Image (tube, helix red, strand yellow):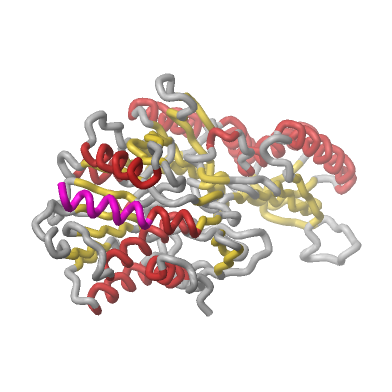
Amino acid sequence: MAILSELEPKAVFHYFEEICSIPHGSGNTEELSDYCVRWAQKRGLKFRQDEKGNVIIWKPGTMGLENSEPVMIQGHLDMVCEKEEGYEIAFDRQGLTLELKGNIISAKGTTLGGDDGIAIAYGLALLEAEDIPHPPLEVVFTVDEEIGMLGADAFVCSDIQSKKMLNLDSEEEGYLLAGCAGGVSVTAQFPVKEVRKKGLPVILSIAGLQGGHSGMEIDKGRGNACQLLGRILYELNQKLIIFISRIDGGLKDNAIPREAKAEILLENSEDLSLLREEIETMKKILQHEFHATDRGIQILWEVDKTNFGEKNFAMEEREVWEEDSKSRVITALYCLPGGVQTMNHEMEKLVQTSLNLGIMSTKKGEVSFTFSVRSSVETEKKELVNRIRCLTEFAGGTISLIGDYPAWEYRNDSPLRQIMVKKYEELYGKRPVIQVIHAGVECGLFAGKIPELDCVSFGPDMKDIHTPKESMDAESVKRTWEYLLAVLQELGRN
């Protein structure tokens, strides 16, 4: 049953709901990419799909605007897949369950993917419309933006004619984005040797954190579950004898992790009371430190009763990291930097350089930490990567980089931005906010490939993106659609 069928504009919400029914997490966008291709074929529109799954669809200008300069409309196909603890969904093969409360759209138990499904919906609705004046359109849908802008990085622009680009990947109505940070995904890998030890198995976890987007919310002071778990393990390792089997946390490098857990062995079952005391002490410390940002923070522990009775605690032999491996990993996790590193001194409240440990995982013989590193200053980005490299190599590990993309530098002279400011003032009687942000959008990559490309990013109101609390305002979607149409009509005349 369609949940959004009564909302206006109907075409936009129809396509958004269609998109939400198709699995399209980062790295799993083939089905949605093929859907866009079939859609274009059915309507006789020229298109191109590359080997990565990026799609571009062309549409001629409407009557009277056929000879206008073309405009690129751009968004990304992938979404961040996060879910509430205990909610059952297979993101790789299941769509989302949408919910509508008043004008607010969300998804039951999961992220909504308004970032950036609404851009795809806007694009398809534009391409389908027969009664909307517009210049020639080049509508570009890229893949894997959320894991390093891999689609945009691989995209070949030789057949792009546009010199103006409207990126629909922003989350605050009334703001025109005119610049953003560059970034790179860095994975630090540590080999671990395993030995068999006997002890009392305990599952230790940290939960109840707010999380958020590692660009937009990195300055909010919210706790990072992976790094806080490292702090807890360091403290426990100082007070009692523990062995570690594995540590895991987070799902995406660009989402501040809300949960993390460790599987440990206590050498002595008598240490259970000391463990309890230390956990209670740490919980009070963290609840005090994060009372303003993460009121729900919890440190949880339970004896792993998988292989013995519900009430009977028993020692068990398991594979754990040998002492040197344990020491190296705990030290790295505790000491690797995180959060805001520098602020911009020219633009108020703008983060200049940061990093986020978004994924922590354990495989046989290896532990890895994956960071999203961001900076609007290329040399600071490289310096931060080198700091990660230095400490990682000192602790016996190696690093690898993926998805290195440039900053999108603010352009003082932007004819496109001038037109969009003027049109916004005409429609709403006030000036939009011109903004440079710390989060990344694909404009920088396209600007680096297309000489003199003039870009602006904008979008409707969304909250809590990259978290299961993500929501989108339907009325804002409608207003942004009307603004988009007005801008396109104005661009056709210029």
From what the image shows, is residue 256 above or below residue 349?
A: below
Q: Is residue 204 visible?
A: yes
Q: Is residue 367 visible?
A: no
Magenta stretch holds residue 487: yes
Q: Nearer the viewer, residue 370 or 63?
A: 63
Above/below status of 110 relative to 429: below
Residue 443 versus residue 437 in the image, above or below: below
* 162 lies left or right of 355: left
Q: Quadrant of residue 400?
A: top left
Image side of residue 16 versus residue 292, left or right: left
Check if residue 467 falls in the magenta segment: no
Determine the residue positioned at 72% across, 45% down. Answer: 243
In the depicted view, which residue is nearer to us: 372 or 306?
372
Q: Name the side, left or right, on which 54 lies relative to 299.
A: left
For image coordinates 31% across by 66% down, the residue present is 124
Instruction: Residue at 29%, 64% (x, y): give it.
Output: 126
Residue span colored magenta: 481-494
Q: Position of residue 78 (x, y in %)?
A: 41, 59
> Number of labelled discs?
0
Image location (x, y in percent) of residue 447: 23, 42
Where in the figure is residue 25, as x and y percent of width and height? Answer: 45, 62
Residue 121 found in image quarter: bottom left
Q: In this view, which residue lies farthest toward the left?
A: 67
- Apparent side of residue 387 relative to residue 226 in the rendered image (left or right): left
Residue 375 locus on image (x, y percent): 40, 32
